[in-house]
Amino acid sequence: METLSFTIAGFLLLLLHIVVTVHIILHKDDVPSAIAWTGLVWLAPVIGCIAYIILGINRVRRKALRLHNRGADIFTLTGKTPEEIEKEVPPSLWQLLRLGYKVHPQHLSLGNSVRPLINGDEAYPLMCAAIASAQKEVLIASYIFNNDKAGQMFIPALKQAVKNGAAVRMLIDGVGLNYSRPNIRAALKKIRGIEFSVFLPSKSPVNLPFVNLRNHRKMMIIDGQTAFFGGMNVAEGDLVSQHPKEPIQDVTFEIKGPVVNQIARLFEEDWIFSGRKPFLPATNRLPKQQSATGHTAARIIPDGPDADYGKIERMCLGALACAQKSARIVTPYFLPQNDILSALETAAMRGVEVEVILPQKSNIFGMDWAMEANFRRLLSKGVKIYRTQPPFDHSKLFLVDDVWLFAGSANWDVRSFKLNFESNIECYDLELAKQVRKIIEDKKAKATPVQYQHMRPPILRTLRNNALRLLTPYY
């Protein structure tokens, strides 16, 4: 009897391995990833299958994506055709513009104003003032919204918005919510009139298969007129001038104009995905067409582990291919896969000035060593790498030819390119690019260049760095 039981168990285990392997072959486009998962499944019985079922399968099929096909033309202020808009973009970037339409078929909106804001010291007071003045609607999505000095700054503003009669909706990621204890949820629930939702609650058994997926977007939309959009969380560390225990440098953007509609629509998609009802009746009270507030042509590029993912990574690859003079990258985490590394090398070898600016010391254990594993190959091909001194720099900027800006929540790593829900803004504006160029130059002036001749670490250090690099998708 026992022998029969073992035979049945062995057969079922073999069947499980076969089923999982077939799933890997059918659904994993990345060959190294497919090989790695297959090896784990067969070399680590049971554990490998469980790990793949929890972490390896993309289950996200967002029904909210249907919103993309509804009323898309309202986002273009002037109703201009792509060909007419193309005339307002420098000829060197026409190919990038055309690529963008293929990657994400959303027209550029014209007549926006986009202003960079440095650290929470500059951004949070403006955010709070805008929220407090809201009359109709406040939409807030964030990866981290801590219950600390920074989070508490927003409580009076949120109360005032509710008092004004504005509909207030807040969406916080399930992992990011728990960065502070107690988290901000209890404080917000005391304010009657705020609708609060958690994106994939991390402690819910139902969401265990999604534990490696995070909503990393950060956006605030007030009355459909003003948005704050970028990579800055709400955390005490961003109040750098107040000398917090762990200061964080960052950049976000204040945005006005018709592109705000695109940001609001993206929030609505995430809101529905989190289990909430659509709020189109509320947004219908807000302006669909807006007058020009500036000269920036812009659009939002959303990305996530949906059936159609990889948009931000593809835009980065396209921009590196189109760059003629310069490609300047500021990112806190730099662990891209080989296609991005090769694109950086190829651009530098074509004569493009490629600069990557990273923090000297990361806030994630092992990140510095893992990033260092790629330095030597990049430096040997002419890519310039700079390391900024503390405080830790969380800024995310990509500037091409001092014209095209790509900024938002995405880091230059596999987690952002493959796993997280992210969003970036694509901008064509010489004046905005000039402002961002100055921000980048100020960072570079305080940074230390990494020298190629110094990148010959001892074998044990190389072994450590390369081993940690293998964890790239899970940092």
Image (cartoon, helix red, strand yellow):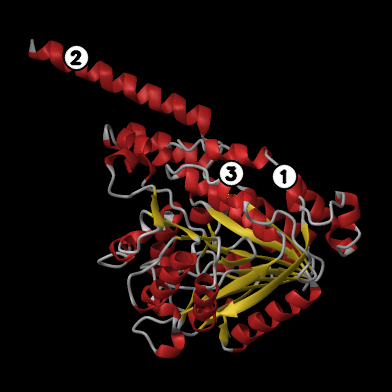
Q: Which mark is residue 7?
A: 2
Which residue is painted at 57% across and 89% down in the image?
Answer: 446
Q: From the viewer's perspective, is the residue at label 3 or at label 2 nearer?
A: 3
Q: From the viewer's perspective, is the residue at label 3 or at label 1 nearer?
A: 1
Q: Residues within 10 Å of mark 2 (few under 14, many from 20)?
A: few
Q: Nearer the viewer, residue 367 or 244?
A: 244
Which residue is painted at 56% across and 50% down in the image?
Answer: 282
Residue 450 in view here: no
Q: Residues within 10 Å of mark 3 (few under 14, many from 20)?
A: some
Among the 4 quarters of the image, the one containing residue 153:
bottom left
Q: Nearer the viewer, residue 315 or 30?
A: 315
- Name the residue that disc number 1 marks: 72
- Name the residue that disc number 3 marks: 309
- Name the secondary structure under disc 1: helix
- Name the secondary structure under disc 2: helix
Q: Position of residue 355 (x, y in %)?
A: 66, 73
The answer for how far apart the CA atoms under marks 3 and 2 are is 42 Å
